[in-house]
Amino acid sequence: EKFRCRNNDSCVVTPVTRKRCKRCRLTKCFKVGMRKEWILTDEEKTLKRQKIVRNRMIKQQAQLSFQQQTNAAVHSTVQINTKTTE
């Protein structure tokens, strides 16, 4: 994909302005040592996003399972304590 700069390749790229000009941002990246091979294709980006979504779901399920186990343990402890105090 070819990017064009509206400011004759003279944009100042900072964390705040980095999204304003893709061409100048990419040029700056190459100047500081980035390689062309490190740019993800659209397919690679999609796969990466899908992996992130899958990992988030797995993490959420694990947290939910842990919470359910904790709640069950607390509930059984309360029942045991109630029976012993009767």
Image (cartoon, helix red, strand yellow):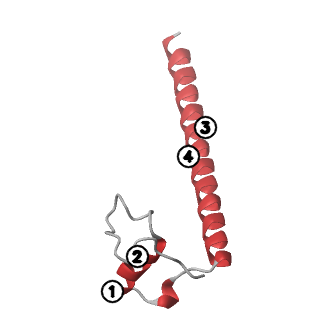
The disc, 3 or 1, on the residue closer to the chain's N-terminal end is 1
Question: Secondary structure under badge 2?
Answer: helix
Distance, label 4 to label 1, CA atoms, is 43 Å
Question: Secondary structure under badge 4?
Answer: helix
Tell us which disc is closer to us: 3 or 1.
1
Question: Secondary structure under badge 1?
Answer: helix
Distance, label 3 to label 1, CA atoms, is 52 Å
Residue 42 is marked as none
Identified by mark 2, the residue type is Cys
Identified by mark 1, the residue type is Lys
Q: Which residue is mark 3?
A: 68
Left or right: where 27 falls relative to 54: left
Structural crowding at the residue carrying mark 2, measured as other residues with C-alpha within 10 Å and reported as few (<14), some (14–19) or many (≥20):
many
Q: Which residue is mark 1?
A: 31
Residue 35 in the image: x percent, y percent?
44, 89
Distance, label 1 to label 2, CA atoms, is 10 Å
Answer above or below: position of 5 versus 50.
Answer: below
The disc, 2 or 3, on the residue closer to the chain's N-terminal end is 2
Residue 48 in the image: x percent, y percent?
60, 70
Q: Where on the picture, by quarter, is residue 66?
A: top right
Point 56% across, 38% down: residue:
67
The disc, 4 or 3, on the residue closer to the chain's N-terminal end is 4
Residue 68 in the image: x percent, y percent?
60, 37
Q: Which residue is mark 4?
A: 63
Q: Which residue is mark 2?
A: 24
